[in-house]
Amino acid sequence: MKILHTSDWHLGQNFFTKSRKKEHQAFLDWLLNEIDSNQIDAVIVAGDIFDTGAPPSYARELYNQFVVSISQRNCSLVVLGGNHDSVSTLKESKSLLACLHTYVVANTSDDIEDQLLVLNNRNGEVGAIVCAVPFVRPRDVLTSQAGESGTEKRQALGDAIKAHYHQLYQAAVELRQENSWQVPIIATGHLTALGVSPSKSVRDIYIGTLDGFAAEAFPPADYIALGHIHRPQIVAKSEHIRYSGSPIPLSFDELKFNKQVVLVEFDGEQRVRIEPISIPSFQPMGVLKGSLEEIDVQLSQYKDHDDPNAVWLHIEVSVQDYLSDLQQCIQVMTEGLNVEVLQLQRSRGPKAQALSQEAKETLSELTPNDVFQKRLALEVFEGEAELARRERIQTQFSQIVEDVEHVEASE
């Protein structure tokens, strides 16, 4: 049984008003080729199929076309809901997609059988049992108790998620024993495991209640396919517990590491291979940092860039004195180059320098989040409850900005 683990597609994402449609289409075409060349039996997408709960029509079209294409290859598809996904959006086509070898698990439920999947290989034989756990919303597994402290709520949520995993795993073990199947048990998840390294595009999903899920709380599954963290990595030094990461960079800081999907192969119950497969870059991007003189030198690398796609750039300029025409300087320096500056910032210098420049910054140089953080810094948050409230405010503001940018991009 050969399984491809991927996650965090975020179909429909806009990157500084730039559509990712071409990149996502190129990735899905590449993924279909990998399925063909490696004779993959099943693909698991561990959450965040879409970037928002109301994805644009082209994102839904990409998703539906992929489902049809993969079904024609006699390959199963398991789709897990993530914190960005709308439960109702995923469920609306669940029954229809089931006819195309696609299993959609949008949310957790009391009915364990809804999350216990039996996958066949290309020969039509049972090849694996999947404990299909999507993003677990606290209300799905936990009843809030009056008077609980923040610590007690975190403990209760962690215990509830752990119990859900182990209940589902035990049901899988019993199913395997009842049928005398020699197949692996695979678990999934869309959460933050303790000790992982997130990127800037990853939002906390258990704000105020759960900082992270302990790796030792996972059941002893043969492979655990995780989503939500965009950087591919192994969890708790356990080779079989992995984040595949997002297939394309969702923020400029994600350029630091390679994108990948993970191929997992089993011979009966025995895991015989875990092999990351690197995903090619479908959109040139770059980060330039330094003084204006250093930036000018770094830009020279793009003089011969004749790719049809312009390079998307993040430029961070370190300047000793305030420059009111920084944007114009960069515009002159990039003139004639096949590049687009999507983000221009001043580097964060010493505190004194930052304070002296703060009053001189123009709105064009600040992101909405920069303005919001400056305002939030004037408030006082003391104690656990107040700090949790601050985090909730930050999360809500980020969601509002994201929704506004999405609406502007679609107009």
Image (cartoon, grey):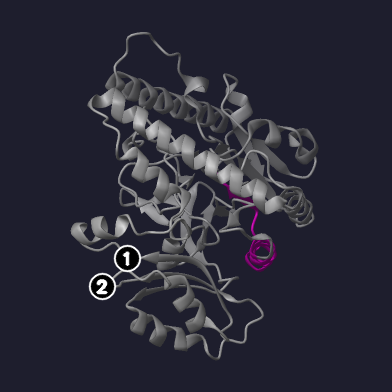
Q: Which span of residues is magenta-colored?
A: 23-46
Residue 204 can be seen in this image: yes
Which residue is located at x 56 percent, y 71 percent?
280
- Eyeballing the image, is 108 above or below 306? above
Residue 187 in sight: no
Residue 381 relative to residue 70: left or right? left
Badge 2 marks a residue whose secondary structure is loop
Residue beneath label 2, please?
320
Instruction: Say if 141 sits above or below 185 in the image.
Output: above
Q: Which residue, given by chain and number where applicable, does mark 1 sit on?
A: 347
Sequence-wise first label, 2 or 1: 2
What's the magenta bit mostly, secondary-structure-wise? helix
Residue sitting at x 51%, y 85%: 302
Q: Amino acid at mark 1?
A: Ser
Q: Residues within 10 Å of mark 1 (few under 14, many from 20)?
A: some
Name the residue: 29% across, 62% down: 348
- The x and y percentages for residue 124 are 72, 47
Looking at the rendered structure, the number of numbered marks drawn on it comes to 2
- Residue 72: horizontal and vertical position, in percent? 79, 55
User: What percent of the width, then of the height, locates residue 44?
Assistant: 59, 48
Picture quadrant of residue 361: bottom left
Tag 1, which secondary structure?
loop
Tell me the kind of residue under disc 2: Gln
Whole-percent x, y for residue 257 in the image: 42, 66
Real-space CA distance between mark 2 and mark 1, rounded to the nearest whole angstrom: 10 Å
Q: Nearer the viewer, residue 331 or 92?
A: 331
How many residues crowd around disc 2 within 10 Å: few (fewer than 14), some, or many (20 or more)? few
Residue 42 in the magenta stretch? The answer is yes
Q: Is residue 407 above or below residue 118?
A: below
Circle 2/circle 1 CB separation < 8 Å: no
